Each structure stands twice: as structure tokens, then as C-alpha cells.
Image (cartoon, rainbow, N blue to C red):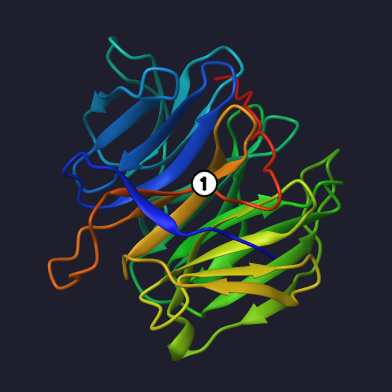
């Protein structure tokens, strides 16, 4: 597998960039700077980057079918359109969690959302159904992180950063139900912490490793076999998504780390990718 180098790409003076999301309709890349409560938009055609949101902390977000943003924040889920005030749709109170973290929409428009736990085992993974109801579907995680689906939607993938595990669940597309998981990969200290992830058009998984000593990007096949390892310049790499009109590039987000002398940007771009990505789904939460 031939993957090119990660090049410094975009700088916005962020603290922790996360949840990169490519929108094919507008050919723009969006991401959140969690501690600062910002969301940014980078227009592919013009190369212009702008801040489109500055308010409460956003752990993750989706694009809704109607073009609005669905923001998963500390204590609520809100609807947002740039230029308007966010509108709280549902409150979120979970004794073991401090805020939402990574989120992803499924093909039917539901949203799976992880949380940051108050303890190392008190956070979890939730599913928001189309009516806005929230159900916890996995627990025991301090940091519930990246997610993805297999191309045939037979499986759902979820990262528990705390336990350094990549899980694979049988997934029922009709109901959103998850079956019993297997541990697809168990990392160790040398691997750093698995953070965000994405899936390419052939079903391979691209796992970003926070604090990895050697390989910040590890690529797995659908059965957990390692296909490729690559170094990433920033030690505090956080997530990735395919981007570009043909989903032919990989954007990697990073966090500010004053001790990291190799970090030169908030976002990095890997231009040379052997396999293209897939378009992410839009949420259809009606509240």
C-alpha cells in the first residue's frame, strides 16, 4: 500500500482540531476546535478558510439532510445554521459523562455519539434515533472516539481510546441495533492511543494514533490485519477523513502541543492515497 507523506496544510490557531467532515455538495471540509468552541470551513475550490461558529464547546457534529448542522455539545444537542443563533433541540444529562466527543451519522440518518467520561470507565457510546431519543449502546470507556461503517453496512466500528481498542459490531441497518462486539485490534503503549478513524471505499480502516512513538497512522483490513503503518509529523494527531472532489486525499487533524517540535499545522493533508474514500452520511434527526 503506497501512501504519501502528510504535508502541513491549514493553520487557524486552534487548540484541538477534531471531527473533520467533508461535504461533497459544497466541496468543503469542516472541523471543530473543541476547547475554543469553534467550527471551521475550508472551501476546496477557493482555498479560503473561515470560522463559521463560535459558541459553546462542540465535541462533534453532523450535517443534516436539510443543510443545517447538528451540534453535539457539552450538555445539549443543537441545530445551527451559520449566521444564526444555535437552537437547543435536546438536553443531555449523563452522570458519567462530561461532554460529547466524536459522532457519525448512519445511512438512515441516525447518529452514533461518543462521550468523554468523568472517570476512565464512565463514558460511553450513544445512539440518537430519528425522533431524537438517546440510547446508550456501549460503556466502560473514558474516551469514546472514532467510528465508521463497512461498505456493505454489515459492521460498525468504534474506538475506545482508554482501553486502546478498536471494536467491530454487527450492525442492523434497519433498526440501528448493534450486535455483540469483537476486539478487532488491541493496542499497547508503543502504539499511542487510537483516536479518530475513517473507512475507505474498499472497507479498509485508517486509525489515527494520539501520542504514537512511531506510527501515527495504522491501516487495517476489515478483519484487523495491519496493511500499512506510517509516521505522522504531529504526535498529537487526532482524526482523519477523506476529502477532495474525488475523495482522493486524506485530511488529518491535530492538537496544539507546545512540546511537539514537529507540529507545523492544525491540519495535514496526505495527497497520495491508493484508495479513495466514501462520502459520509447526513443525519435526519427530527426534533
Q: Is residue 109 above or below residue 170?
A: above
Task: Judge left or right: residue 183 versus residue 7.
Answer: right
Task: Judge left or right: residue 262 versus residue 199.
Answer: left
Q: Which residue is mark 1?
A: 271
Q: Position of residue 259 (x, y in %)?
A: 14, 73
> In the current view of this chain or complex, which residue is farthest to the left?
258
Q: Is residue 220 above or below residue 149?
A: below
Residue at horizontal 57%, vertical 12%? 66
Disc 1 element = loop
Image quadrant containing the N terminus: bottom right
Q: Position of residue 226 (x, y in %)?
A: 69, 77
Residue at horizontal 17%, vertical 70%? 261
Q: Position of residue 28 (x, y in %)?
A: 46, 24
Image quadrant containing the C terminus: top right
Quarter of the figure with residue 81: top left
Quarter of the figure with residue 243: top right
Q: Is residue 49 above or below residue 238?
A: above
Residue 124 appearing in the image: no
Amino acid at each position: 500500500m503506497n501512501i504519501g507523506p502528510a504535508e502541513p496544510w491549514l493553520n487557524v490557531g486552534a487548540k484541538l482540531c477534531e471531527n473533520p467532515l467533508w461535504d461533497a455538495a459544497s466541496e468543503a471540509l469542516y472541523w471543530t476546535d473543541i476547547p475554543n468552541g469553534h467550527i471551521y470551513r475550508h472551501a476546496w475550490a477557493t482555498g479560503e478558510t473561515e470560522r463559521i461558529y463560535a459558541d459553546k464547546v462542540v465535541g462533534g457534529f453532523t450535517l443534516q439532510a436539510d443543510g443545517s448542522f447538528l451540534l453535539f455539545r457539552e450538555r445539549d444537542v443543537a441545530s445551527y445554521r451559520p449566521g444564526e443563533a444555535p437552537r437547543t433541540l435536546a438536553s443531555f444529562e449523563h452522570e458519567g459523562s462530561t461532554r460529547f466527543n466524536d459522532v457519525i451519522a448512519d445511512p438512515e440518518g441516525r447518529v452514533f455519539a461518543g462521550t468523554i467520561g468523568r472517570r476512565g470507565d464512565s463514558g460511553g457510546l450513544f445512539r440518537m434515533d430519528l425522533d431524537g431519543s438517546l440510547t446508550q449502546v456501549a460503556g466502560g470507556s473514558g474516551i469514546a472516539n472514532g467510528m465508521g461503517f463497512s461498505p456493505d453496512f454489515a459492521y460498525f466500528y468504534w474506538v475506545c481510546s482508554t482501553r486502546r481498542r478498536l471494536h467491530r459490531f454487527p450492525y442492523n441497518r434497519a433498526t440501528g441495533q448493534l450486535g455483540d462486539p469483537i476486539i478487532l485490534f488491541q493496542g499497547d503503549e508503543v502504539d499511542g492511543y487510537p483516536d479518530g478513524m475513517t473507512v475507505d471505499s474498499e472497507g479498509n480502516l485508517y486509525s489515527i494514533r494520539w501520542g504514537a512513538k512511531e506510527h501515527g497512522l495504522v491501516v487495517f483490513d476489515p478483519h484487523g490485519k495491519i496493511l500499512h503503518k506510517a509516521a505522522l509529523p504531529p504526535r498529537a494527531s487526532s482524526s482523519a477523513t477523506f476529502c477532495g472532489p474525488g475523495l482522493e486525499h486524506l485530511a488529518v487533524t491535530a492538537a496544539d502541543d507546545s512540546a511537539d517540535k514537529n507540529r507545523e499545522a492544525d491540519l495535514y493533508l496526505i495527497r497520495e492515497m491508493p484508495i479513495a474514500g466514501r462520502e459520509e452520511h447526513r443525519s435526519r434527526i427530527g426534533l
